[in-house]
Amino acid sequence: MSPGNAELRFFQDRGPETTEMTWMMTLAATADPSGSLSSHFTTIDWVVLVGYLLLVSVIGVKLAGKQENMEDFFRGGGKLPWYAVSASMIATAISAVTFVGVPAIAFAGDMTYLQLGIIAGLLSRVFVAWILIPAYYQKRIYSPYDYMGNQLGSGARGVTTGLFTLGGLLGQSARVYLTALVLTLVMAGPLDWIQGYTGLSPLASAIIIIGIIAVLWTMLGGIATVVWTDAMLFVVFVAGGLAALWVILSALPDGFAQFRAVGTEFEKFKLFDMDKAVDLTTPYTLTAAGFAVVVGNIGAYGTDQLMAQRLFTCKSKGNAQLAILTSYAAEAVAALMLLVGVGLFVFYHVFPEKLAGEAALLAAKENDKIFPIFILQQMPVGVTGLVIAGIFAAAISSLTSILAALAQTTVSAVYLPVRARKLGLTKDQEHEAITGDPAEAKRVVTVSRWLIVFWGLALCLAAFVVNSFKEATGVPILDLALGLASYIIGGLLAAFLLAWLPIKVNGRGLVWGAPISVMAVFALRFHEPWAYWACGGAMGLLLVTWVIAAAGTLDARLRNMRLLKTGWLVVGIAVVMSITYRGYFHHYDEKTGAVLIEYPQIKEEATGKPIRDLDASPVYYLHPITKEPLTDEVGDKIVNEKKGPFLLDKSAGAPKKIPIAWPWYAPVGAVMAFVFGYLLAEPKRDEAPA
């Protein structure tokens, strides 16, 4: 299962004009009759939440032991048990937004989301276990990028580390932002209390709290603490999901029988959709599950340091293989949360009156809010604290993992080479120095801890930037940022294949193939005129840089070889531009088969807002279950301001463009990076001068 999927859906229909704080205050007001979330989040809930965090902190640090060198800090001494590593991988794959967003998928639709995990999750883990892990365990390394650097040269390690850092920083900062929004939703009362004493907004408080706890956990014990705390977080995920399902089943008059009957009647348990098995514009299909997501998951579990770092902490190659294979249990967690979503639908189908007022309006605006609404209104005292602890656990898990990964790759790619040059050491002597000299080993651990602080601050600041950018522009930057893994995974997987296959080329081609890969994925997603200029500008800059670098080569033979390869680079650029111009599908009318034409909205010059068509019937918000129009306090129907009717410019229509679904980004990126990484590379024996 690809972990970022549900997150891409979260908040995606939200309009830039609507403020988050208004929605949070509204939901808080509907949590109980008194209108206060704090009265629902009782002292017992606080004891459960705080007690859980303290317990996990103490046990995690104690189990991690002392961190005396880089081996201890980033590999856990190579002695962590497979079951803890497996649970840690599962916990990292489930983020807070996934914990909240996956139930909404089944609530609004069915369980076809799970087919991605059932099929692709198994096939990808088998590939990682039998191909990637044996290659990694040939030498003592700390990341997949060390392996790629050893096989292809320092250029490959640099470009793969750069890809991971870019993806980790942007993707995870957006996840921190989204996670903070979830926490401000379910903990509105406590965060409002903090705002009263500190003046910090609930969003700022949530980001800071998440960042502080994650940094402390990661600093105290390195990857060992991350693994052990994640393993305990996994237990809380399952407990929270089971608690929610138990509350739902207990509330139904006929219990499980009613749950099954209503769910079956409305086809909520449908797992495979054969009608869309080969639809490239739909993410949850058999074709995507059997191929596209397999490629993406191989890259995510085997070449992305966020997940792969755990594989290097096991006692042996066999233990690492066992850990990755048993992490297939993550799909059981996804299935549990989908069942919670079905339960939510059944609960509100039986008791539609329990979803009323502002809560019903929030759910009508975004079905992703349905689980938080249920938590705040229906969960009993104490259990609320447990479920919120599960959400908090999911948030911290994702952040501790990326902090450890970013710190390790920065140490390996930047600090150690710089330190080795300062000490006059060769590359072969570098590892001896940091492991053999106690003082130098301690220095590396200290630097690593400060890097965790640095990256923690960077991620939190980037989360604020994401929020500010979204509010200022309304551009769906969150979809782009959270889907960034799909942009870089293809390049990372291609780098491994170039290093692993017996094709005997260096990594120079990958330096140029990786940008082509990233832009190819970008071209798959965006097909507007501004995207043509973006792709053209990026590819033009890449071509100019290539020509300058090739012409500046001192060795005449290499200079001629590189200039001749310019043709292959031009081919890659042409492919990227072709994708952004033509790499999409049209939307067809189901009755006539004609291509649907979209017309732009006419907007006011002063405000830039679309003008409503006052002669047409308005669109109202409907109750998520009964489908009746929702009314305000005076009985008037509530108009959906986001949907038509608006005045349209009938003179400027164009066919609607449907981009290829996100699971296909990784395969396309991998093919582009591998093909042009190979065509633009040079034989290994040619250690080319600059």
Image (tube, rainbow, N blue to C red):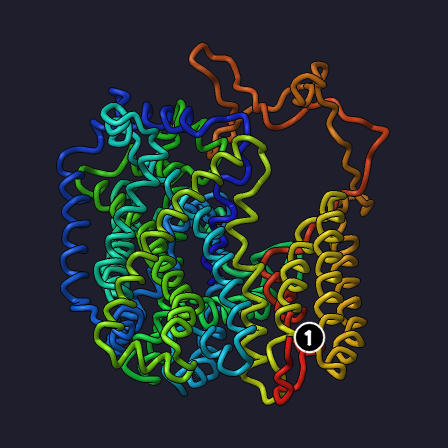
- Where residue 392 sits in the image (x, y, percent)? 29, 47
Horizontal side of residue 608 vs 222, given as left or right: right
Q: In the image, what residue type sits under mark 1?
A: Val
300 and 76: which is toward the camera:
76
Q: Which residue corresponds to the image point at 76% horizontal and 66% vertical from the top-left?
A: 547
* Residue 206 in view here: yes
Q: Quadrant of residue 310?
A: bottom left
Residue furthest out toward the top: 634
Q: Which residue corresponds to the image point at 46% horizontal and 34% vertical from the top-left?
A: 625
- Where residue 639 sits in the image (x, y, percent)? 56, 20
Q: Quadrant of residue 33?
A: top left
Q: Which residue corresponds to the image point at 13% horizontal and 34% vertical from the top-left?
A: 43
Q: Quadrant of residue 418?
A: bottom left
391 and 619: which is toward the camera:
391
Horizontal side of residue 475 vs 636, given as left or right: right
- Where residue 495 sits in the image (x, y, percent)? 56, 74
Horizontal side of residue 437 vs 686, given as left or right: left
* Residue 262 in view here: no
In which quadrant will I find the C terminus? Answer: bottom right
Q: Which residue corresponds to the image point at 62% horizontal and 69% vertical from the top-left?
A: 511
- Can you say whether 193 is above or below 54 in the image? above
**Total marks drawn?**
1
238 and 401: which is toward the camera:
401
Q: Which residue is mark 1?
A: 675
Could you classify mark 1 by the number of other residues whose Cα lies within 10 Å: few (under 14), some (14-19), or many (20 or more)? some
301 and 332: which is toward the camera:
301
Residue furthest out toward the right: 651
- Where residue 215 sits in the image (x, y, percent)? 29, 52
